[in-house]
Amino acid sequence: MRSLFLSFILIFFIGIFAHAQQLYMPRNIQIAVEKGTRSMDGNPGKNYWQNEGKYDINVTLTPETKTVSGVEKIVYSNNSPDTLRMIAIRFVNNFHKPLAPRGGYTNPDILTSGLDIESFSIDNEAYQIDSKNWGTVAAIRLKKAILPRTSVTIDVSWNYPLSKQSGREGQIDSTTFFVAYSYPRVSVYDDYNGWDMIPHTGRQEFYNDFNDYKLSVKVPKNYVVWATGDLLNPTEVLQPEIADRLKKSLTSDDVITIAGFNEMQQQKVTQQNDWNTWKFSADHITDVCFAASKNYVWDAASVIVDLKNKRRASVQSAYNDTAKDFHHYTKWSQNSLRFFSTKWPGVSYPFSKMTSFQGYADMEYPMMINDATTKDFRFSQMVQDHEIAHTYFPFYMGINETRYAYMDEGWATTFEYLIGQEEFGKAHADSVYKMFRINRYIHDPSAEEDQPIISMSTQVSGSGYGNNSYGKASLSYLALKDLLGDTLFKKALHHYMDAWNGKHPIPWDYFNSMSAGSGKSLNWFFNNWFFTNNYIDLKIDNVKKQPGFYTFNVKNIGGFAIPFDVKITYEDGTTSLEHQTPAFWQKEQKENVIKLSTDKHIKSIELDGGIFMDYTPEDNVWKK
Ligand SMILES: [Zn+2]
């Protein structure tokens, strides 16, 4: 009796697993699920934890020597169940050191001597630190272990030079500086990997804890400072008229010039103390950075980002007066914040401010972007949209970009495309998306570089990194949107974003969360897009006329489960169009037959994937 019952149970469960396709999961992620920090239902596990810090940072920027020096106090909480016997300190700007490993060639003006730690103590116990040979992340053996669910206070003082050539940070001109990654921080300790010890090589971007920050920046008079967070003391650092304009801009739809070119030249903007200390604060955010200039102009406005409570966010721009595109940046950012808050992703802009700063990076930071000026206004606006879109991934959602860059670049690329449709029309957005995001990938002459999207971002080289992070990932998100339809896709996306806002989702959390949020098992789709060497290549074959209907085969040579249109032209000159969603490939992923009822004679059939650019478009067309 008993054994018969067990066999019955066994058969029952085999039946369930045969239906629900499982996704490959590395052993460390399986262990996280077993420990209950992650879960298969797509929500954070019941034992989920993440560590955090309270940072009180005081930095001085000395324009004469182009150096940054600082002191900070970090209250670091170990919320994990683990005893920490070492602590990892990350300083991305050590990437400038000549011996640092880096992803590509560099030139001498990028190189600096890097970080110099002057003092370092934990709970008032001094450590002798020699940071001369530190890379971008360094392990410090602790004199006293940090026990589970306790915190320590870390005091650090340091200095470092700003590189002459500016990449993501550094000197912009002789009196303008973009100062990012400027303080030593505790690297992430997480539930699936432990300490994040992956060196920064200049390509992959953020993976940071959500921390609370107080940031004060000391600069000489006539330097304006823009930073992540709310400016706490505008009247202490700005002249009354300027502080007044800034205040007005917080409720203004119209763009207000806060500091014009002549006012900056005539020293009418900042208080005339020898040095001013600008104070900012931002909570539960993954980073803070700042910029300072003695010659940039500054304008600002605001925009409603929450229709329910009419909450406004400040939008500001700081730029060289000669940059024509930047004169539009404040207006454009109002549009970005409105679109992202109300359309896609349709989540209220989560911060109080967004500052666009003219530099050379084309790079996002929490509440700030750093963009190069261009003469092509549409291109400038597209880049601005892209960088602001990053607010959601990786900042609203604490993505580990070092390992899973596709979890943020793919979304920024998708939102850039969707807002582009509204700003410039679908035809323009399609052509730009194809040109900048897909064309190089699908025609990559070195296709071996092209690895499954799930590959760790540090382990794909050459074009493989960009292909996975931007184009292919974005196509997967847009294919899923097509599969589910806009309403269900948005519901699932919001389910995922609500569950993981302010936390650290990994790809399996995304997969499980989207399945749960849509109420559909999407593993077949995620397996097809993320875990294979698929690409995009359809082929039409075997067109047959029968009495009253046609049949033809659609072969999926490349393998990706893409949506496509079937465009028919009849001999009488009429045409028809039928859309196939990726569901076309759910049961049979290699080849399917389409039956078309008609008494007319077909002249030609075309399979058109649109932005899903085909590797060999010539075999997508059949002509009689
Ligand atoms: Zn990006």
Image (cartoon, rainbow, N blue to C red):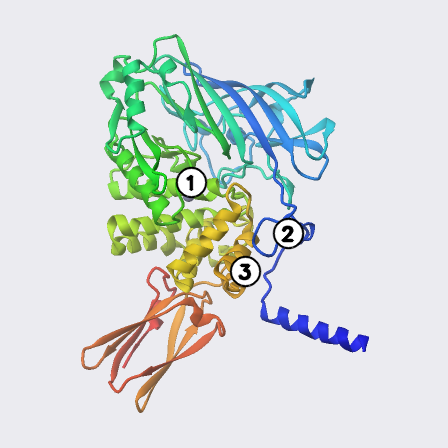
Residue at x 61%, y 23% (from the top left corner): 132
Count residues near mark 3 (Cα–Cα under 10 Å), then give few for <14, some for 14-19, many for 20+: some
Of discs 3 and 2, which sits in the foreground?
Answer: 2
Are the two marked residues, 1 and 3, in contact with CB atoms closer than 8 angstroms? no
Q: Amino acid at mark 3?
A: Phe
Quarter assignment of residue 301: top left
Q: Quadrant of the C terminus?
A: bottom left
Quadrant for ligand 1 reads top left
How far apart, in angstroms, are the residues tagged by discs 2 and 1? 26 Å
Among the two numbered marks 1 and 3 on one chain, the one whose residue lies closer to the N terminus? 1
Helix, strand or loop for disc 2: helix
Helix, strand or loop for disc 1: helix
Residue at x 42%, y 58% (from the top left corner): 489
Quarter assignment of residue 504: top right
Say above or below: 237 vs 437.
Answer: above
Q: Specify the farthest residue to the front.
A: 309
List the residue tagged with mark 3. Answer: 531
List the residue tagged with mark 2. Answer: 29
